[in-house]
Image: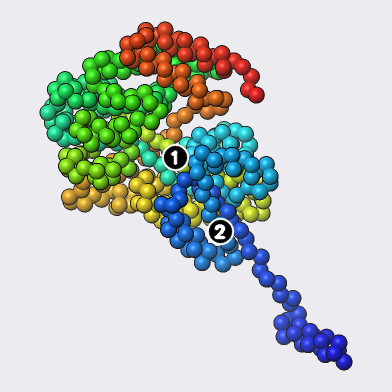
Amino acid sequence: MEVRRFFSRMFLFCLLSGGTVFHAAAVEKIEFWTMSLKPKFIPYFQTLVKKYEAQNPGVKVEWVDFPWDILQLKLITAIAAGTPPSLVNLSVPWAEELARDGLIVPVEALMIQPPIYTLGALADLTFNGHLYGFPHYSNVNVIAYNRKILSAAGISSAPKNMDELLFDARQIYAKTGKAGYAPALGKIDGFMMQQGLDLIKDGKAVFNSPAHIALVKKLAETYAANGFLKDKLFAEDNFPAVVDAYLGGRLGMMVSAPTALRRIQADSKEVYAQTDIFAAPVGPTGIADGGWMFNFAVPKGVSAKSLPSIARFAQFLTNDENQLEFAKNANVMPTTVKALADPYFQQLPLQAQAAEKAQAVAARSMDNSRSLYVAGIEDYDELRRFLVKAVEAGVTGKRDIKLALDEAAAIWNRKLAKPAR
């Protein structure tokens, strides 16, 4: 009797339900990784995730943040284990390296057409004819200058090129006794590339060419004339020394991303009140100084059937609205055309100060912003140190510039001649 009653109830249930057997809807999981964005951006990403899940009830999003120095190892390990995240936050050099090794996949077929991103951002992520990421944010340098110091030096207009910037640096010292400019010569490779000078051509080092030697001679002339801030001039990161010198009134021009202006504003209202902004000169190739873009890439091993859903979330992460909000929080530049055109960047308040001016100047340079780096070289950081040491010896007058660069090029070429492991 109980068995008959059970089947009667099941029959009635099937009639009422139209004969359909119900199953709990499968929840789709999207896991995305970022680097070194906690704890500052916890509220931003928590809000963003909740918003997306509310708009997409069948999707569960998990945000994981790793320190920048372990993210690559975590990613490679996850790919090898067959458990990659759906998306991973990368710099352009890392994206190029992983694309070359087949560890991230092209995304042009997944992206809404036409793309919403700037041409410069798309070009940055295009390797061998394929697009390997969804652009997120970038930056570009501006020149913050002390009005009192430049006025005393008789300088009233922005330098149009590197020669004029070096001339202004020498003139500032000659007229005021203060350093004019603090280039990041510990990153001389990017400095040279921004000036249109390759480091490697046809598999050989070429940074000892007459054009490279001429550039280093100009740097040496400015060094000898005390136009440069000499504190940590050849350090891998001279930014803390540059900020300290500018805050102390010992430096006329500070070339940096707009973010630095918030530091000046917080640490010295007096110096900040005397600060104004020039656009940093582009190089001969039209590339702006200081570009370094981050993006979201799709790792190898992600399920093909999940790609459309992952692409929708990637485009949500990097859309106009969310990029603009992130850029405001982080004091960086968005990489979408519409976000860059937002009044936040383009319409300066009547009493605009240096930080607002820097954002507007940087936004106008973003189409020319590119990440400059040397791709495909094992132990590149070690090789770069040889180049920096050679340039340091030449700039400071300790060695003949040509001989120093020749020796560094020979070291590079011995390395480049060895087959990759």
Label count reads 2
Residue that appears at 39% across and 16% down: 391
Q: Position of residue 386 (x, y in %)?
A: 46, 18
At label 1, the amino acid type is: Met
Under circle 1, the secondary element is loop
Label 1 crowd bin: few (<14), some (14–19), many (20+), radius 10 Å = many
Label 2 crowd bin: few (<14), some (14–19), many (20+), radius 10 Å = some
Residue identified by numbered label 2: 61
Q: Position of residue 86 (x, y in %)?
A: 59, 50
- Residue 144 lies left or right of residue 299; in this view the side is left
Residue that appears at 64% across and 45% down: 78
Mark identifier at residue 293: 1
Q: Position of residue 192 (x, y in %)?
A: 40, 22
Q: Is residue 167 visible?
A: no
- Residue 350 lies left or right of residue 305; in this view the side is left
At label 2, the amino acid type is: Val
Residue that appears at 42% across and 45% down: 137
Residue that appears at 62% across and 34% down: 101
Q: Is residue 68 depicted above or below 382 in this figure?
A: below
